[in-house]
Image: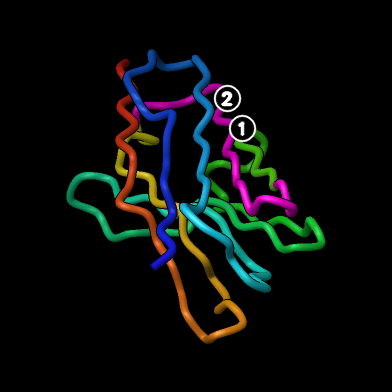
Amino acid sequence: QVQLVESGGGLVQAGGSLRLSCAPSGKLFAVDLMGWDRQAPGKQRELVASISHRGLTNYADSVKGRFTVSRDNDNNIIDLQMNNVKPEDTGVYYCVTYSPDAFGRHYAGKGTVVTVSS
């Protein structure tokens, strides 16, 4: 079964930048909406950014103007450029599909940890 594999997490100082990437382990068919969720320590999981196949994007208010999501449609690779990061951006970031593929399935990665030090 296809899995989503995240990379690029790590430790970064506040004000710095980090780039996350997500690639499927196999072929995804007809997935329109993909993006990133995150779960901060002690908080509920939340949507960070999403992007459609046409390139329409949506961001959480807390990251608008700082994060940029991009997509390679040919390979279903999703990147998240994180600039001017803040300690509250600390958490586990998950690559997810927000709409099903041609077979009605959803996918999510195991997550990558981002830690922002103050």
Are there few (<14), some (14-19), or many (20+) residues within 10 Å of tag 2?
some
| SS at circle 1 | loop
- Which residue is pictured at 52% across the width and 66% down the height? 97
Q: Which residue is mark 1?
A: 66
Residue stretch rendered in magenta on the structure: 72-87
Amino acid beneath label 2: Asn
Residue 27, labelled with which disc? none
Q: Is 46 rendered above or below residue 112?
A: below
Q: Hey, which residue is sitting farthest bottom in the picture? A: 104
Q: Provide residue 19's location: percent of width, then percent of height.
A: 53, 28
| SS at circle 2 | loop
By what rule are the colours in the image chosen? rainbow
Q: Provide residue 21's location: percent of width, then percent of height.
A: 52, 37
Q: Which residue is mark 2?
A: 83
Q: Quadrant of residue 30?
A: bottom right
Q: Is 100 rendered above or below residue 75?
A: below
Q: Quadrant of the C terminus?
A: top left
Q: Quadrant of the N terminus?
A: bottom left
Q: Provide residue 45's location: percent of width, then percent of height.
A: 33, 59
